[in-house]
Image (tube, rainbow, N blue to C red):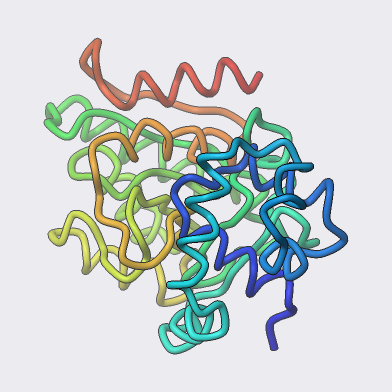
Amino acid sequence: MPNQNQIYFNAFNQMSQIGSVRLRRLLNFFPELKTAWQATASELLQTGLEEPIIQELLLRRREIDPEAEFAKLESKNIKLLTFLDQNYPPLLKEIPNPPMVLYLLGELLARDQQAIAVVGSRKTSPYGEQVVYDLVRDLVRANLTVVSGLALGIDALAHRTAVEFDGRTVAVLACGLDSIYPANNRIIAEKILSGHGAILSELPLGTPPLKHHFPHRNRIISGLAWGTVVIEAATDSGALITATHALEQN
């Protein structure tokens, strides 16, 4: 059974205007999120939220049924992890601006805290493909979990190789978990969920894979791992954005 905080974490996460920073303001002011959800405009103003955001929040919460939204997750066997939960990934808590909510398909195990992120280009070379295969094989043999973004190319090969060698792998999406993107990787996603790991997103159901979601998603890929390996990538690629996040996260 979900606790009330989980229900209202999910409800607030339906509002694109309420990101991690603003949600923390609400958590710091109200004893529980249900109280924040029912708060008046004057009470919300005391949290430090801006007036236009408060007006949008009041409007949006009339359109959202927290219980019904959470029931959608349960119907799809999607679990919700919040920043306050004990099983929230501890490494991820240490990054700047960690996601306050994670949606989860599959299962995260304690051993998945020992992870390496493997990312790279969507257009692979034979060299890159061989390096991914050899590296991921050895990571699996060392009982390390492989984290990537389920994109075409290097990401997909990293997940596929981890599964091939009966290892653990975690995929982080830039869309809601009610759709696997890209669709070409649905078979890989099914194999991950057949006991080989988990698929995560911070985005609510129904969120499409918009371009600006990907750079933001990449901080989670690096944030879940001890280190990040870029196999091959263009100078303006998402893989190098992930590397930048890894450096910022130390």
- Image quarter (top left, top right, bottom left or bottom right) of the C terminus: top right
Residue at left 81%, top 64%? 32
Position above or below: 239 against 14: above
Question: How many numbered badges does the structure rendering display?
Answer: 0
Closer to the camera, 128 or 93?
Answer: 93
- Image quarter (top left, top right, bottom left or bottom right) of the N terminus: bottom right
Position above or below: 78 against 184: below
Q: Quadrant of residue 80?
A: bottom right
Q: 231 left or right of 187?
A: right
Spot the residue most to the front: 42
Q: 201 left or right of 82?
A: left
Residue 128 is situated, as x and y percent measured from the top left of the image, at: 22, 27
Q: 131 left or right of 82?
A: left
Residue 113 is situated, as x and y percent measured from the top left of the image, at: 67, 49
Residue at left 64%, top 69%? 8
Residue 166 is situated, as x and y percent measured from the top left of the image, at: 44, 64
Spot the residue most to the top: 235
Spot the residue most to the right: 31
Closer to the camera, 25 or 54?
Answer: 54
Residue at left 38%, top 21%? 241
Q: Quadrant of residue 48?
A: top right
Closer to the camera, 174 or 183?
Answer: 174
Residue at left 74%, top 79%? 3
Q: 149 left or right of 100?
A: left
Position above or below: 149 against 77: above
Closer to the camera, 209 or 51?
Answer: 51
Residue 235 is situated, as x and y percent measured from the top left of the image, at: 24, 10
